[in-house]
Image (spheres, rainbow, N blue to C red):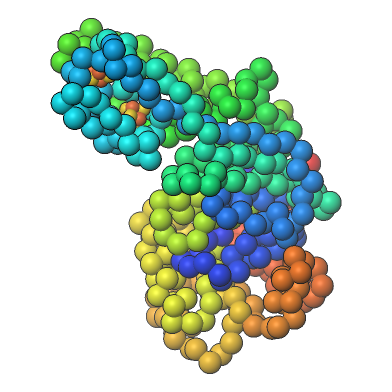
Amino acid sequence: MNDLKISIASGKGGTGKTTIAASLASIIPNSVYIDCDVEEPNGHLLLKPKINTEEFVSKLLPKIDPFKCTVCGNCVEVCEFNALINLKFEITLIDEMCHGCGACAYFCPEKAITEIEKPIGVIRRGITEDNIYFIDGLLNIGEVAAAPLIKAVKKKIPEGGTAPYNTAIGKGTSSYKKGIIAVKNEFYDSQIDNETTSYKKEIPKGRDDFDKNDFDNKIFSDNKSFLDNVKPESSSSEYFKTYIIDSPPGTSCSMVEAVIDSDYCVLVTESTPFGLNDLKLAMEVLKTIRVPFGVVINKYDDSYREMEKYLEESKTDLLLKIPFDRKYAVSYSKGILPLVLYPELRTDFFDLYETIKRMIGLEMGKVQSV
Ligand code: SF4
Ligand code: SF4
């Protein structure tokens, strides 16, 4: 049995997405809550984990030595992300567009490019009093690209493993390096999956001696060493572990990065015209990336019926309606999950979890106990 990844997303901010995600995590024994809303992670305010580790994550940026560079343009040609510009007398880098893949340095015939680390954020891990494993990412102020950090956060989920917390720290590998590898893999993965042959095609002039196998071996060995580090201590075919992924709001690439490999996505909305508009956009994204989903209407009141009408017409599963109630808002404002104070909500979330499992065809009652 594979692990179960449930993402919680919303087309717009302020719908109560994090409250839903944290509530769901809190009723699942030994679940793993992963806050991928790295620009504004606030799951920790509700779950109050004891943070045990903090790891800094960097991406690699190229640094060009102007004394060695002949402005041949090879690096510009090979950059898939248009992060380098040839100004005829020098090459300039647009930091924000660079994915730190290292291709430019690899292909520079003059060895004029070295790579320097640029910190982009931190990954924090801990555990709550109720044994919820907690992971979140916090993007550095001023850093514009959240997706690489989200990817690094999600690399903490071992593939096919069942012991995510204790084994996610690699032996003899600095966390910095792991973060860098994770970011590099973003590029490598896309090249391997989609454009394996494009390298051959795009080898700049003068690099005919390029050995693609060597390059691929390098890619795979980096990837392999990372995955070795996160290999679980034990695995079980009978039980699965549940990961709750709290996605960034909206429908940007950060949201896509957070939800793309989920088994199921819960879209949280509110019954307002704005909620409905943004819900439709989020639904389109999920359909495009083929992630199954259902909807939770939070802060529900029956004065706006368009939402339910739309869900019915579009044959979208309405998973749960949480009524608007001032007491829930007061609880939230004090940093307390409403279901802690109001047991009727616990039942709702148990039902929600069982519904999700039913939707994706999982047997009930096989949740792993660590
Ligand atoms: S490939 Fe190297 S030498 Fe050529 S322009 Fe880029 S940095 Fe300069
Ligand atoms: S590291 Fe990759 S993305 Fe960045 S400039 Fe070089 S080739 Fe482009």
Let me know if residue 359 appears in the view: no
Closer-to-camera residue (189/181): 181
**Residue farthest bottom in this picture:** 303
Where does the image place residue 179, in percent across and percent down from the top left?
55, 31
Expressed as whole percent of the image width and height from the top left, the position of residue 36 reads 56, 50
The image quarter in which residue 349 lies: bottom right
Give the left or right position of residue 150, taking residue 343 as reference: left
Q: Position of residue 7 (x, y in %)?
A: 56, 55
Write the residue at 75% across / 43% down.
51
**Image quarter of the C terminus:** top right
Farthest residue toward the right?
129
Q: Quadrant of ligand 2?
A: top left
Q: Position of residue 138 (x, y in %)?
A: 59, 46
Is residue 15 left or right of 45 when viewed as pictured? left
Pick the residue in front: 210 or 174: 174
235 or 180, which is in the foreground?
A: 180
Of residues 196 and 112, the one drawn nearer to the viewer in this rendering: 112
